[in-house]
Image (cartoon, rainbow, N blue to C red):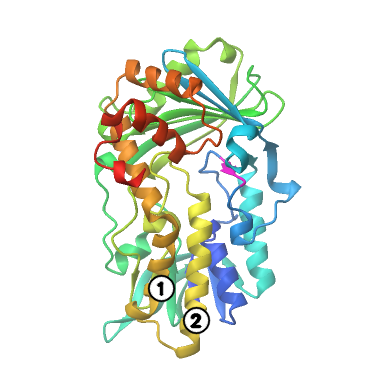
Amino acid sequence: MRTIKCDVVIVGAGPGGSMAAKYCAQGGMDTLLIEKKAEIGAPLRCAEGVSKSWLDEVGIKPEASWIRADMKGAIIKSTKGTTYQLDESKAGNEVGYVLERHLFDKALARDAANAGAKIMMRTACTGIIREDGKIVGIKAKSMGEEIEIRCKAVVAADGYESQVARWAGIDTTLKLSDIDSCIQYRMCNIDITPDYCEFVIGSCAPGGYIWVFPKGDKIANVGIGVAGQKCTRGADAKYYLDKWIAEDPRFKNGQILEIMGGFVSTCPGLDCAVDDNIILVGDAARIIDPITGGGICHACRTGMYAGQVLSECNKTGDFSKKALMPYEKRWRDRMEDKLFRNWMAKEKLATMDDDTIDDIIKMISTSKITNVTVYNLLKAIKEKYPKVVEGFEDLI
């Protein structure tokens, strides 16, 4: 069996994996990034919306090639029809881009390669290699060939399904209430506002929301997430999305060009995302915004932190759990409070009826919030509807 040796192997060439590979390589590590699919970024499994606020933080420069649309703002609607529209004057860099995600992912992988990382396509991890109880590499199948990759550390960047984490003995089990069932259509010939993302909240999407992300020329990603505990009929996400589309006259001439579906974790992260010789990043670590299901920025941040910490560990040769704990500190210091707050807000949202949601959107639309963020929206809700934030008011 062929054996490849390197300092670190990263499993999965999504945003988290490519960022980890980039920063490991920049830190002087012999870095190997493997991807099981034939094309990075495809097939699409993402709504493709991101804010602009975090890109500079992780060293990503916007490129016209992967920006499909530059949004002016967002529209938030209740199932009953109340609307709140905000633009950059209120939301600033929280307003963002709609991506061509497959090109975005390729650009990040290119940056990793430019930093010195090697990339192997059609290479799937099939197991963890341990010697004397210690992780010393992975088993993989590359273009049909069984191989071993021997390394000092493994980065699990293999997304929601993360087998690598489970093989390493890390419990990534989710409660049903911390899973959203999602489906999205790429639709054409629809009459939508071309430069505003749209979010619809209420019984039309139990425990989640419907989104419309414009992609130019009457084309948009139109999707839905439904909380796992609210799924009772089978194929619930498709049922609710089809029902909503059928009832909205803007879509009467619309046609579906593409369908994607899957699941999103909506918990506030794992208890610990490291162990001896292994780090989990992004969706594999359940580090994702629980209220929106958005995970691109979290994957990029955690990938960067992982690469930085591993590079420091490489200087001493110590990749023990204790040596990797600075990664835990970095992501928790940067994101944990917000993730927990948004998880609590998600839990409350799942219990609200349409009248309450409608009243809250009416209240927000008449409030004097000058900088619209989830945090500031929750502050306004706390003043008028304190019971909504009961249990996490100290985080607001």
Task: Where is residue 90? Give x, y as percent.
Answer: 59, 33
Task: Where is residue 307? Give x, y as percent.
Answer: 52, 71
Amino acid, disc 1: Pro
Q: Are marks 1 and 2 in contact (CB under 8 Å)?
A: yes
Residue labelled with disc 2: 312
Q: Can you name the residue that lies furthest to the right here?
A: 64
Quadrant into which the C terminus falls: top left
Q: Nearer the viewer, residue 321 or 352?
A: 352
Task: Where is residue 143? Give x, y as percent.
Answer: 54, 66
Residue drawn where x is 59% and y is 48% of the image: 53
Q: Which residues are magenta?
A: 48-52
The correct choice, above or below, for 299 with respect to 392 in the image is below
Give the label on residue 326, or none: 1
The correct choice, above or below, for 14 with respect to 396 in the image is below
Residue drawn where x is 59% and y is 60% of the image: 58
Residue drawn where x is 41% and y is 73% of the image: 326
**Between discs 1 and 2, the one toward the N terminus:** 2
Q: Look at the image and tell me whether residue 36 can be seen.
A: no
Image quadrant where residue 316 sits: bottom left
